Image: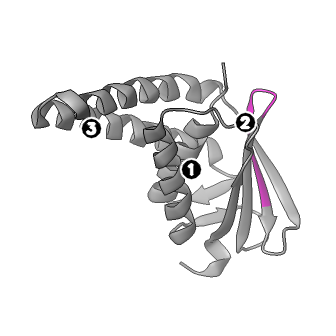
């Protein structure tokens, strides 16, 4: 991917990060690494990249603070978290079941849970792409990794 369509740095607002099980923290770390390694990200109607991205939650909204390679602010993209709540909740529930199943169930049950987990992950990433439409263009894999990070930032209760 050309540098003009890439995220070269991403920072999560650590005050927004809800601490989860070690497995979920591992997924977050992998998503961050994979996102930097390979992504397709373009700010529509804005300057070309490379981009630096800060992601956090502010007043019940998801905020993408998009910056250029020199860390100059280009734009804030603010999305309501409401459309994401159900899919995030369902995703966490199935992840918990999946991680528990790995420890005590057979391969066929684990595979069924994993298919459900991947399906919810795809649903969340499709929703993210829909909500970003007209603001930020991302490919499917980038949306999946960003959705993982959104889950990591999900509201602490």
**For this view, does 33 lie left or right of residue 116?**
right
Q: Secondary structure at mark 2?
A: loop
Q: Is residue 83 magenta?
A: no
- Give the residue at mark 1: 146
* Label 2 vs 1, first from the N-terminus: 2
Residue situated in front as seen by the camera: 71 or 139: 71
Dot 2 alpha-carbon crowd within 10 angstroms: few under 14, some 14 to 19, many 20 or more: some
Between marks 1 and 3, how big is the CA–CA gap?
A: 19 Å
The quadrant the C terminus occupies is: top right
Q: Is residue 65 magenta?
A: yes
At 64% from the left and 47% from the top, the residue drawn is 132
Bounds of the magenta span? 58-66
- Give the residue at mark 3: 114
- Give the residue at mark 2: 16
Q: Do we see residue 24 in this rendering? A: yes
Residue 101, quarter of the rendered image: top left
At 50% from the left and 69% from the top, the residue drawn is 38
* Label 3 vs 2, first from the N-terminus: 2
Dot 1 alpha-carbon crowd within 10 angstroms: few under 14, some 14 to 19, many 20 or more: many
Residue 110, quarter of the rendered image: top left
- Residue 107: x and y in percent read 12, 37
- Residue 154: x and y in percent read 62, 31
* Label 1 vs 3, first from the N-terminus: 3
At 67% from the left and 77% from the top, the residue drawn is 4
Q: Check residue 5 in the rendering and tell me which mark sits there, or answer none.
A: none
């Amino acid at each position: 991917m050309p540098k003009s369509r890439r995220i070269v740095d991403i920072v999560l607002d650590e005050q927004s990060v809800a601490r989860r099980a070690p497995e979920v923290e591992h997924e977050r770390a992998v998503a961050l690494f994979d996102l930097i390694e390979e992504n397709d990200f373009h700010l529509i109607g804005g300057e070309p990249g490379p981009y630096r991205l800060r992601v956090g939650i502010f007043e019940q909204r998801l905020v993408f603070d998009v910056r250029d390679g020199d860390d100059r602010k280009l734009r804030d993209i603010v999305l309501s978290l409401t459309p994401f709540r159900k899919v995030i909740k369902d995703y966490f529930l199935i992840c918990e079941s999946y991680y528990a199943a790995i420890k005590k169930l057979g391969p066929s049950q684990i595979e069924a849970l994993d298919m459900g987990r991947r399906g919810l992950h795809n649903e969340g990433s499709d929703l993210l792409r829909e909500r970003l439409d007209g603001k930020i263009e991302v490919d499917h894999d980038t949306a999946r990794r960003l959705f993982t990070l959104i889950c990591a930032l999900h509201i602490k209760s």
